[in-house]
Amino acid sequence: MTVPSRGMTLVEVIMVVTISTTMIFAIGISIANLYKYNAYAFAQSNQVAEARRGVTRMVRDIREMTYG
């Protein structure tokens, strides 16, 4: 008659901790890269909007000089 094993062995616990740590680390790096890329895209969008406002103002000023 064999006794059913209860719990996990040390090797199994070490493997679970290693795999969990690796997954958490990979997810953390992915989130950090996502925030970095998102910040870059936001800055780029902001620069485009500023350039658009500048060109619009310049066109308006040129039209005022021409007609005024």
Image: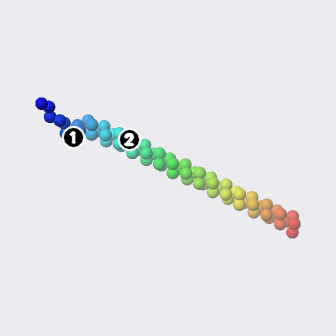
Q: Quadrant of the N terminus?
A: top left
Q: Residue at x 39, y 45 (%)?
A: 24
Q: Residue furthest left?
A: 1
- Which residue occupies 83% across, 66% down? 64
What residue type is disc 2 on? Answer: Thr
Q: How many numbered marks are there?
A: 2
**Which class describes the residues within 10 Å of circle 2: few (<14), some (14-19), or many (20+)?**
few
Q: Nearer the viewer, residue 28 or 1?
A: 1
Residue drawn at point x = 70 percent, y = 57 percent: 51
Could you say where residue 38 lies in the image, as x and y percent from the top left?
55, 51
Which element carries disc 2, helix, strand or loop? helix
- Residue 56: x percent and y percent? 75, 60
| Image-based side of 17 in relation to 67, left or right | left
Tell me which residue sits at (47%, 48%) in the image. 31
Quadrant in the picture for residue 5: top left
Colour scheme of this structure image?
rainbow
Residue 15 pos. (x, y %): 30, 37
The label shown at residue 7 is 1
Q: Left or right: where does residue 48 sit relative to residue 25?
A: right
User: Which residue is situated farthest in the bottom direction here?
Assistant: 68
User: Splitting the image into 4 quarters, where does residue 17 fall?
Assistant: top left
State the mark number for residue 22: 2
Label 2 or label 1, whichever lies nearer to me, is 1
**Horizontal relation, residue 66 to residue 14: left or right:** right
Residue lying farthest to the top in this orientation: 1
Cα–Cα gap, marks 2 and 1: 23 Å
Instruction: Name which residue type carries label 1.
Output: Gly
Q: Quadrant of the C terminus?
A: bottom right
Indicate which disc, 2 or 1, sits on the residue closer to the N terminus: 1
Which quadrant of the structure image shows residue 13?
A: top left
